[in-house]
Every structure is written in C-alpha cells, then in structure tokens.
C-alpha cells in the first residue's frame, strides 16, 4: 500500500497506541526490576507493601504515565500529501520545527532507554551481588561447620558411635526412675544419608541461584540489544535527517524495527526457558483453561436443585412407607 487511506483520526490513534505500547513495556520492565530487588534484598520489609492492591496501583500508574508521555504523538501526527505525488498520503509526524523534533527524540532516548536501562542494571546487579554472596556463604558454610565440629571434639573427627551429649541419640520421655529411654541410634550410614541429602539440597539451591543470575543478565542484555539501535537511529534522524536516510534506508532500518518488535515477545520466552517456576505456572494455567473443554457442561443450578428436591422427596416417602409398625 503506497498511500495511507484511513484518515487523520486513525493516523493519530495508531501513532499514539504504538508509542504507548513501547512506553508501557519499558516501564513494566523497570517496575518488575524494582519489585524483584525489594523482594530479594529486603524480603521482610517488602512483604508489608507488596500486595495485590499495590500491583494494581503500579499497573495503573504505568499506563497513566505512558498515556501522558505519549500525548505529543496524537497532537503532531497527521496525514500529509507526498510532494511528487499529490494523490498519495503518508501518516507521519509534523513537528513545528527541527528543534522540537530533536528535543522529543532526546527525551525519549533518556526517558525510555537510558534511565530504564540504568535502573534495571543497578537493580539486577544488586540482586546478583546478593545472590552471589549467599552462594559463597552456602559453599563456605559446610567446611566451617565441619571445622567447628572437629574443634569441639578436640581436633578429632567425630566417630559414628557417639554418646548422648553430641546429639546422636533421640531422647524419649523419661521413665519413673528418671532414666532416659533410648529410641534409636544414628549410625554412620544414617549420617552419610543425611549428609548426602544436605549436600544435594545445597547444590540444588546454588544451581537455582546461578540460573536466576543468568536470567537477569540475559534480560538486561536483550533490553539494550533490542532498543539501542532504534533510539540511536531516531536521534540521528532528528539531528541529521539526510545522512540518516542515506545510511539507514532499506534493509538497515527494517532490521532495526524488527529488533524493537522482537523485544515485545522475547521476555516471555526468556522467563519460560530459564525459569522452572514460570514453566510450571504456565502449564497449570493452560491446564485450567483446557479443562472446561474436556468435561461436559454441568446442568443449570435450577435443574440441579429440582433434581435434588425430587430425590429428597422420593427418599422421604420411601423411608416413610417402610417405617416401623
């Protein structure tokens, strides 16, 4: 289609909604990063205010801020006739001057790229730092506990046959004579099983934290890779339109727009392939959506009530007729 045939109203609406979708997506990523930082680095304080109503307020604030930020698009977007072809119309931004266009694209570069990228980098960096220190602590804890146990036993490794004082016996209720009833003795094999289970849990937690760190790094990298070319191209076109048109027309600008469109759908795949809990939640949601289609519909409530009433009446009359003499 060489001409825009939908008119000025649709032109303004399309420009406004496209800008809002980009802004909402970016602000949502920023809000998620801040929420994650508080949930991981300040878990006790965040439990007080991280509620469902708080999530609703964040969503509403994100949409309102995006709606206000993108107001210049419906104001300055319109259909203009091509100079060489009077019958062909294009939907484009008709800025009052070059300085307005330059200020607008610099504002978008700072508001929707630099500041969100900085906030996400700092938040996810602090989360990764916190998880890294937790991993180091968990890796060093078994060795320190083992050394402390050895020092407590006089520098000698604890034996399998230990006495009641070092916790290897399970104490039951005392008898009338006041003696301890020995229920079971933890053998060396029991110690080995507990140690293997503890090590397995510790290794699982470490691997989970490593996966979280990798996922956070991937999210930040994808944000910069997908959005940096577009904001750089728009800013370049605002300050030097002729050079930008010669360098970016054709395949380059198409690829840049493809990267920006990819950012709208890449985050769910990132969460899905790198977060086991997200995969389980998604599978459970899909199962709940598919379940009504597999089971036949239930009869209406009035039919169920009528059927239940008739059965109750039948049972009552039957019991009454078979009553005692």
Image (cartoon, helix red, strand yellow):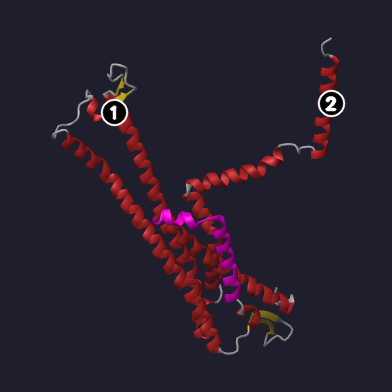
* 57 magenta-colored: yes
Query: Which residue, given by chain and number where applicable, does mark 2 sit on?
Result: 313
Placement of the C terminus among the 4 image quadrants: top right
Choose top left, top right, bottom left or bottom right for residue 199.
top left
Q: Residues within 10 Å of mark 2 (few under 14, many from 20)?
A: few
Whether residue 214 is visible here, answered yes or no, is: no
57 shown above or below 148: below
179 shown above or below 268: above
Q: Residue at x 28, y 16 (%)?
A: 177
Q: Element under label 2?
A: helix
Picture disc at residue 191: 1
Q: Which residues are magenta?
A: 41-69
Q: CA distance from mark 2 to mark 1?
A: 65 Å
Whether residue 189 is visible here, answered yes or no, is: yes
- Residue 48 picture location, percent across and down: 48, 55
Q: Residue at x 55, y 63 (%)?
A: 58
Placement of the N terminus among the 4 image quadrants: bottom right
* 128 magenta-colored: no
Q: Residues within 10 Å of mark 1 (few under 14, many from 20)?
A: few
Whether residues under marks 2 and 1 lie with C-beta atoms below 8 angstroms apart, the answer is: no
Choose top left, top right, bottom left or bottom right for residue 283.
top right
Q: Residue at x 34, y 57 (%)?
A: 129
- Residue 22 picture location, percent across and down: 56, 68
């Amino acid at each position: 289609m060489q001409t825009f045939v939908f008119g000025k109203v649709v032109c303004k609406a399309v420009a406004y909604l496209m800008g809002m979708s980009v802004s909402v997506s970016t602000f949502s990523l920023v809000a998620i990063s801040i929420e994650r930082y508080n949930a991981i680095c300040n878990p006790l304080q965040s439990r007080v205010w991280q509620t469902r109503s708080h999530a609703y307020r964040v969503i509403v604030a994100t949409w309102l801020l995006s709606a206000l930020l993108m107001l210049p698009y419906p104001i300055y977007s319109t259909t203009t006739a091509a100079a060489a072809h009077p019958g062909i119309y294009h939907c484009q931004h008709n800025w009052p001057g070059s300085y307005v266009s330059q200020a607008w694209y610099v504002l978008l570069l700072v508001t929707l790229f630099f500041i969100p990228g900085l906030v996400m980098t700092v938040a996810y960096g602090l989360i990764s730092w916190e998880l890294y220190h937790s991993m180091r602590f968990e890796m060093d804890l078994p060795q320190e506990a083992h050394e402390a146990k050895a020092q407590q036993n006089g520098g000698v490794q604890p034996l399998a046959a230990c006495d009641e004082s070092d916790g290897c016996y399970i104490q039951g209720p005392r008898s009338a004579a006041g003696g301890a009833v020995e229920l079971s003795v933890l053998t060396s094999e029991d110690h080995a099983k507990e140690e293997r289970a503890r090590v397995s849990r510790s290794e699982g937690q470490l691997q989970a934290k490593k996966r979280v760190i990798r996922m956070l790094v991937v999210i930040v990298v994808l944000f910069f890779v997908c959005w940096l070319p577009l904001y750089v191209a728009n800013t370049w076109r605002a300050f030097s339109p002729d050079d930008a048109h010669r360098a970016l027309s054709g395949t380059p600008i198409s690829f840049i727009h493809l990267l920006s469109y990819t950012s709208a759908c890449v985050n769910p795949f990132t969460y899905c392939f790198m977060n086991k809990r997200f995969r389980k939640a998604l599978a459970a949601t899909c199962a709940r959506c598919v379940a009504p289609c597999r089971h036949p519909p239930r009869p209406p409530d009035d039919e169920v009530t009528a059927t239940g009433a008739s059965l109750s009446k039948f049972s009552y009359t039957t019991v009454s007729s078979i009553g005692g003499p």
